Image (spheres, rainbow, N blue to C red):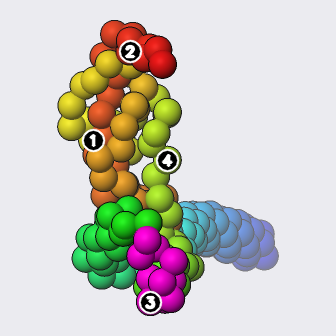
Amino acid sequence: MAQEETNEGLTSKEEQEEAVVEDIEVLKQTLAEEKEKAEGYLANWQRAQADFINYKRRSEQEREEISQFANATLMFSLLPILDDLERAFTAIPPHLARLSWVDGIRLIERKLRASLEAQGLSQIKALGEPFDPNLHEAAMHGKGKEGIVIDELQKGYKLHDRVIRPAMVVVGNGEEEEEKEE
C-alpha cells in the first residue's frame, strides 16, 4: 500500500506540476494578448495626439491668415481713393501746386498711404519689369522690348504676400520704338 500511495502522490504531484505549467502557459498567452492590446492602445493614442497637434497647428495658421486678410476688403475699397488722389495731384496746374491747401491734401494722402502700408499693403513694381501674369494684368501691347512692362495704367497692390489688385499694364510687343531726334 505504501507504494500505491507513493504512486498516487507522484501522480498528483505530476498533475499539479502539469496544472501549474498549463496555468503558466495560459497566463503567458493572456499576458501576450494584453501586451498587444496595450501596444494597440498606445499606437491609437499616439495617432490621436499627432492628429490633435496637427489640428491645433492648422487652426492657428487659419486664425493668423484670417487676421492678416480681414481688412483686405476695406483696403481694396480704399485703393480707388488713392488712385483718385494721385490723378488729382498730376492734374494740378503748376501755379496752384504751391498753395498750402494742396500741400495739406498731399500730407493726408501720405498719411493714408503710410497707414495702409503699416497694415501690410505694398505697391507692385511694374514699370520696366518682365511681365508676370501673377502680378500684372496686360491691358494692351505697345512698341518696346518684348515681354517687358512699358507703361502702367493702374497701380497694383499686395496685402502681405497676396495680390489684392494686379497692376494694369502695357506690355512691349518686340517692336523697337523709333527714337525721336530733336
Residue at 38%, 12% (x, y): give it: 178
What stretch of residues is rendered in magenta? 95-104
- Whether tag 4 and tag 1 are in contact, CB under 8 A, the answer is no
Residue wearing tag 4:
125
* Disc ID at residue 101: 3
**In 3D space, how far apart are the residues under numbered discs 2 and 1 (Cα atoms)?**
22 Å
Residue wearing tag 1:
137
- Position of 144 with respect to 170 (left or right) is right
Residue 103 lies in the magenta-colored region: yes
Q: Which three-letter amino acid code belongs to the residue tagged 2?
A: Glu
Q: Is residue 79 visible?
A: no
Q: Secondary structure at mark 2?
A: loop
**In 3D space, how far apart are the residues under numbered discs 3 and 2 (Cα atoms)?**
41 Å
Q: Which three-letter amino acid code belongs to the residue tagged 3?
A: Trp
- Position of 152 with respect to 50 (left or right) is left
Point out the tag, 2 or 1, that comes first from the N-terminus.
1
Q: Position of residue 58 (x, y in %)?
A: 46, 71
Determine which quarter of the picture holds residue 69: bottom left
Camera-near label (3 vs 1) is 3
Q: Which three-letter amino acid code belongs to the residue tagged 1?
A: Glu
Residue 102 lies in the magenta-colored region: yes
Residue wearing tag 2:
177
- Whether tag 3 and tag 2 are in contact, CB under 8 A, the answer is no
**In 3D space, how far apart are the residues under numbered discs 4 and 3 (Cα atoms)?**
30 Å
Q: Position of residue 181 (x, y in %)?
A: 46, 14
Q: Position of residue 92 (x, y in %)?
A: 36, 69
Q: Position of residue 176 (x, y in %)?
A: 39, 10
Point out the tag, 3 or 1, that comes first from the N-terminus.
3
Point out the tag, 4 or 1, that comes first from the N-terminus.
4
